[in-house]
Amino acid sequence: MTRKWTLLGAALLALCVVSVVATVALDDDSAATSTTIPQATPEQLAAAGLDKLPLAPQSERVDLLAPPFSNPTKITNPLFPISNLHSAVLNGTVDGQAFRTETTLLPWTRIIEWPKGRRVETLVSQYVAYLDGRIEEVALDHYAQDDDGAVWYFGEDVFNYEDGVIADREGTWLAGRDGPAAMIMPADPQVGDVYFPENTPGFVFEQVRVKAVDQTVQGPRGPVEGAIIASELHQDGSREDKTFAPGYGEFFTGAGGDVEALALAVPIDKLPGPVPAELETLASASSTIATKKQAWRNFQTREVPPRLKGVMDDALARQSAFDVAQSALDLQLRYRPPAEIDRERFDLWARRLVVDAKAGNATGVTGDLVVLEWIRDRIAHTLDPVDRARINSQLVRLRTSMNDEDLPAAAAVAAQTSRLARPQPGSP
């Protein structure tokens, strides 16, 4: 999988995806046989400028044949547990700037037809990346597991953003339309195994070789055993190492000084009990920075995921109310349902939009609105139909205000919108 950071509305896309799922019937016999995965010819590789890559011989490949997909959305592979990875936060640095991603399993599936008329139902995972606090990329990734336990990648819808506007769709591909499905995690990876997570020359192309297995890595709760390390070869000939850990999936990626590492995931990092009062204080818009700093000092008597500690320390040092609240909500993921946290995130980004609008930051407001639209897609299924209609209406009004370049109107609408998604007692 290409690094997401390398480089209209989210709502319309979500509606399109849902409509596709609703109108395509799954053929029960179509996924019952094994399929030979088409491979690029030397001529295709040369045409895509990939003929000089040091590709492994097919004798080392474990992704040339796809077993049947009898229950494709039940993904049990511990090294790519997307079925049970409801929400994950990763962070790091890219080009010297803070990098953050949110990965969320969406509540719908998508049926994808690939060669020989096979229709495979896939899970859809939403990936949202932020660079220096602003939206950088969104991707909807499609995954399914074969009957042997390997996980396959069926494509992604990619939206690369600049100044809150879609700059391009580079990296978008779909199995069946653009090329074959591609293995993203073997059922039982062994040292020396080779597979292509993306296998469409001219669109996306990567080779992965497993370098080490049975590794122990430091996770949010302490040591995690059974991780693997893989070397990923990109189209431009560059390489980077990736670590995958049981219960987490993609755990660490590093190359050339850039880092993307898992900070927290649920349900694997979930804790019992109510949200600690200190995290409530840190997320509160009414608490002073001095009160928040004291709350953080008090909270650190508990176990804090290492990659979130530094982020909160930095946010408090900069006295960034938004970043402090965002980090507090990340920590609250351990105690509250992901959809409830996303409702709070929706409220937080709506309040940020108000601040950006009052500051005359038009590009900031545009990006804030995009984030609200994508978060709405994550929480829509949890909302009362009336509340959902209200939020959709407010987002349309916000889009209209931005099209009219009316920042005061956008601020007024966002102030009303922020209250609509706030979790109510007893909400899911």
Image (cartoon, rainbow, N blue to C red):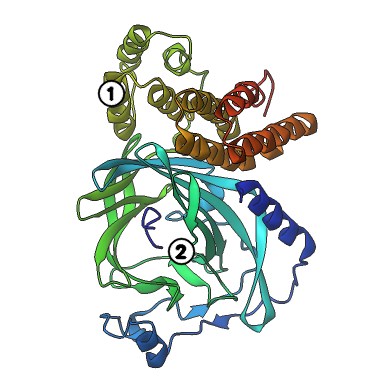
Q: What residue lies at 33% left-to-right and 53% top-to-bottom? A: 227
Name the N-terminal-most of marks 1 and 2.
Answer: 2
Quadrant containing the C terminus is top right
Quarter holding the N terminus is bottom left
Q: Quadrant of residue 45?
A: bottom left
Decide which of 184, 201 is in the foreground and name it: 201
In the structure shown, which secondary structural element does the residue marked by tag 1 occupy?
Answer: helix
Q: Position of residue 80 (x, y in %)?
A: 46, 55
Q: Residues within 10 Å of mark 1 (few under 14, many from 20)?
A: some
Give how far across and how far down residue 73 sits, in percent.
62, 58
Q: Is residue 94 visible?
A: yes
- Going by the numbered disc 1, the residue's amino acid type is Asp
Give amino acid for label 2.
Glu
Q: Residue at x 62, y 81 (%)?
A: 115
Instruction: Note whether residue 73 is visible.
Output: no
Viewer-side label of 1, 2: 2
| Quarter of the view holding residue 21 | bottom right
Figure quadrant of residue 202:
bottom left
Residue 220 x/y as whole percent: 35, 36
Indicate left or right for 190 with 179 as reference. left
Tell me the element at label 2.
loop
Q: Give the residue at mark 1.
A: 313
Residue of label 2: 170
Mark drawn on residue 87: none
Q: Count neighbours of disc 2 (C-alpha within 10 A) and say few if under 14, some if 14 to 19, many if 20 or more.
A: some
* Residue 69 percent across, percent down from the top left: 62, 69
